[in-house]
Amino acid sequence: MKSMIGLLLVVVLVILAYQFYFSKAQSSGVATPAQMINAVGLKNDLVGIARAERAYQAEHGTYGSLDDLVAADALTMDNRQREGYRYEVEITTGGFRVIGRCLAAAGCKSYFVDQEMEVQPLE
């Protein structure tokens, strides 16, 4: 009888841990595995564009638009968007901000990265 109670207790703990783990994954603003893959890809793309901005700035003394980065071969991008996201570059005084803007119908979060190279949610 004690072994049955112990086994039942282990099963309940495993189920609770499983539910907790997957509820945490969905609370990050990403509902499906495909959206999660797109969000991770977006963040990698943002960092890549930010690195291209740094390289462009080192060579030209100023930050550039996406067109400038591609024209200077600092960035290789065939498509300026990822499923559910569109990329934008804002050039500010002394810096830049690369934005991965969520398209409204996609139900995702927008992110940005600036010269600090830290991807953050856009609020």
Image (tube, rainbow, N blue to C red):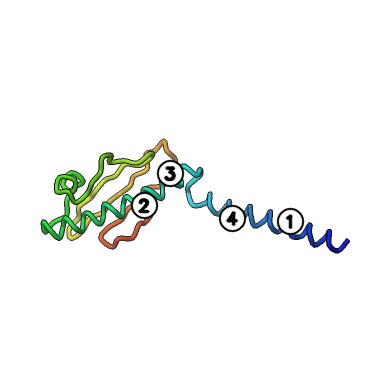
CA distance separating discs 4 and 2: 22 Å
**Image disc number at residue 108:** 3
According to the picture, the residue beneath numbered tag 1 turns out to be: 11
Q: Give the amino acid at mark 3.
A: Cys
**Mark 4 or mark 2: whose residue is earlier in sequence:** 4
Picture residue at 63% right of the left edge, 54% below the top? 18
Circle 4 or circle 1, nearest the eye: 1
Which residue sits furthest top? Answer: 105
Image location of residue 71, percent across then percent down: 15, 45
Viewer-nearest residue: 91 or 119: 119
**Image disc number at residue 21:** 4
Q: Give the amino acid at mark 4.
A: Tyr
**Image disc number at residue 43:** 2
Picture residue at 41% right of the left edge, 50% below the top? 40
**Mark 3 or mark 4: whose residue is earlier in sequence:** 4
Image location of residue 25, percent across then percent down: 53, 52
Viewer-nearest residue: 99 or 74: 74
SS of the residue under disc 2: helix
CA distance separating discs 4 and 1: 15 Å
